[in-house]
Image (cartoon, rainbow, N blue to C red):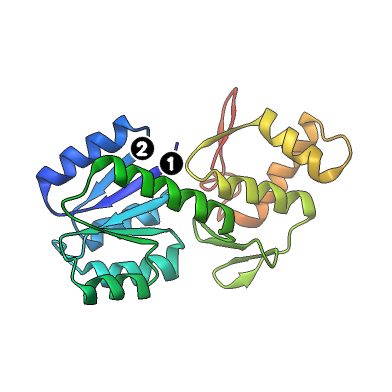
Amino acid sequence: MERILLVEDDVMITESLGTFLRQEGFATVCAPGQKEAEECLDGGGIDLVLLDVSLQNGNGFSLCGKIREEYQVPVIFLTASGDEYSVVTGLDLGAEDYIRKPFRPRELISRIKAVLRRVGKSRSVFDFYGIRVDADKAFVSKDGKEIVLSALEYRLLLIFCQNKGNVVSRERLLADLWDVAGDFVNDNTLTVYIKRLREKIEDDPAKPERIKTVRGIGYRA
């Protein structure tokens, strides 16, 4: 289930649009201003941001630039500011789309899905709770310093990045690792690689925060 962050300071719009998005199958969180939005983004798991220009604190244009630079999450402006200057500014800052209020709900859903499809195919840089993964370069870093991973450790991390905020079953991990390794990866081997990966990316491997065990199922990224 895709997770949408709605950044909007109008309580009535937040309540009605948030309810509509949930009915359409999107997990939705709301923030009235830039500070609250950044806190949500820092928590991870956001797939798309619906962003107004006017906010309780901060500015939509400023926040859009920061989102694209630091979080690599697609942005759709959803605002009453529909003049040419505002539209061009939003798109130049990296927004995927710009929708003027009032809007037709079904059209909004269609455009959200179009952006998610487009970005899903092209996204190559992931921010995983302070760990940056550049899939094009197969480069992983923490606090700006490179982390050297084996092929299977890297594949594991990439799976968790792509499922940030969700539970990934051990069966799913085993199936994906089989495809990459080309040989048999059993349950015990998976446990070993999870342990090795945690040792490289966790601040305290004994108390993991980035890859948590969900007993009887798998792991929560």
Identify residue for label 2. 27
Q: Nearer the viewer, residue 24 or 135?
A: 24
Answer left or right for 107 relative to 188.
left
Check disc 2 and report its element: helix, strand or loop. strand
Image location of residue 4, percent across then percent down: 35, 46
How packed is label 1: few (under 14 Cα within 10 Å), some, or many (20 or more)?
some
Q: Residue at x 73, y 63 (%)?
A: 148
Can residue 198 be seen here? The reply is no
Disc 1 and disc 2 in contact, CB within 8 angstroms: yes
Quarter of the image where one finds residue 28: top left
Quarter of the image where one finds residue 175: top right
Q: Residue at x 36, y 59 (%)?
A: 75
Using the image, tell me which numbered label, if any, was put on residue 88: none
Q: Quadrant of the N terminus?
A: top left
Can residue 122 be seen here? The reply is yes
Q: Is residue 15 above or below residue 37?
A: above
Which amino acid, by three-letter code, is at mark 2? Answer: Ala
Identify residue for label 1. 2
Check disc 1 and report its element: helix, strand or loop. loop
Image location of residue 111, percent across then percent down: 37, 49
Q: Nearer the viewer, residue 167 or 93?
A: 93
How packed is label 2: few (under 14 Cα within 10 Å), some, or many (20 or more)?
some
